[in-house]
Image (spheres, rainbow, N blue to C red):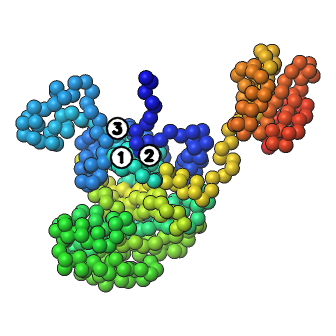
Amino acid sequence: MAQKPSIPKGTRDFNPEQVAKRNYIFNTIRGAFETFGFQPIETPSFENSETLMGKYGDEGDRLIFKILNSGDYLAKANEQAYAEKDALKLTSSISEKALRYDLTVPFARYVVQHQNDIEFPFKRYQIQPVWRADRPQKGRFREFFQCDADVAGSKSLWQEVEFIQLYDTVFSALKLEGVTIKINNRKILSGIAEVIGASDKLIDFTVALDKLDKIGEEKVKEEMRAKGISDEGISKLQPLFTLSGSFETQMESLKGILNTSEEGKKGIEELAFINTAITELGLTTAVLQLDVTLARGLNYYTGAIFEVSAPAQVKMGSIGGGGRYDDLTGIFGMKDVSGVGISFGLDRIYLVLEELKLFPETVNKNVDVLFINFGDKEALFSLKAIKQLRSQGINAELYPDAAKMKKQMNHANKRAIPFVVLVGDQEIESNTYTLKNMVSGEQDKVSLETLIVQTKK
């Protein structure tokens, strides 16, 4: 009995219409990247495990897909690892490579490996798939594309300002109005951890805080207690859970909370600089909002952090995010190379555009003209015209088989091809073409020049 075909959970097939819509998003993002001066690179789908492990925190590391070594890997597994029951040694002995979890760590590896060939500051963009062993749900997949832009080699806060403008440019071009760009600063989070006496538990604190919108205030407090943060410290956090108002109002409240933390004060200064610049420059359709509970649970962020929310009427997780990382390349032996970057969540953006019916009708355009096939002589005559149409940027094709005309016309209808051309003996003798409009039903005998004009509209 033949096996029923299937694909792994968290992955998808894409039909021609879906691919066309995804390409519309890709092209919009790519165009904005290049307008802002970013250059494209690509990195391998998988990296050495040591490149990825330990860069995303404990939760992130658990979501990395490991690749088993080729050959009889079990027989070659380190016997000492078994004897010592050392899971890390066992894992490394049977798996030395892993699918990339994101594009940022591979970018850091790329910068270090190619540092002698790079002109700094280096502005790069990358549009490639990543893989995470996550639990699949709406808007969350195990294989998905990321669209990243990063700058390496500049500590200037003008880069953060430009990234906010870049988000605004892309979402405005996609006609996705009402997007909220949330911003916070890791220095503020460090300052808060210092104030509540939990500096040694900064990672635990930020990972828990980052879940506030998902699990709620009480569950976040429970997780913090479980990680050893005192009730006294947690009580000092209470103003954070209720902080509201304008960007400026929240900043004033933060100054009171962080008046004893130099690190926290520096974070406030950086946010104030960015907010002042954006207020002066203005945004087209997006809104910049301060969210002091925004933590983004990745260990490498050190300054500003971003997260983008879809319009309020759409129930969807973040559709973009990023931040500043002052020394990510240091883990690969290259110190003092500051970086900042953002990512667009293609798959979630797709779902949002679909739900709000924001894809242009023209995005699904495929073939403009189908030539009916009546036989070899007619097909050859048609292909000469098709060659001319294609040279004019008109998508044209010949039905490959001399099938019944009804079958060929049904094929055109099912594919929503707007024009059909019929070529018989009379058309060949008069060097003309019978052009049928499949929408209106009108049919005329035209010259090649007129055919080009009519189908190019």
Quick check: marks 3 and 2 in contact, CB under 8 Å? no
Q: CA–CA distance between discs 3 and 1?
A: 12 Å
Q: Residues within 10 Å of mark 3 (few under 14, many from 20)?
A: some
Q: Would you name the residue on which mark 2 appears?
A: 144
Q: Which mark is residue 268?
A: none
Mark 3 highlights which residue? 46
Query: Which sits earlier in the primary sequence, circle 2 or circle 1?
Result: 1
Measuring 84% from the left and 35% from the top, which residue is drawn there? 436
Residue at x 6%, y 36% (from the top left corner)? 83
Whether residue 311 sits left or right of residue 456 in the image: it is: left
Q: Nearer the viewer, residue 62 or 163?
A: 62
Q: Quadrant of residue 183?
A: bottom left
Q: Secondary structure at mark 3?
A: strand
* Residue 124: percent from left, percent from top: 44, 48
Q: Amino acid at mark 2?
A: Phe
Q: Is residue 163 visible?
A: no
Q: Which residue is mark 1?
A: 132
Give the residue at x 35% y 49%. 134
Q: Is residue 14 left or right of residue 105?
A: right
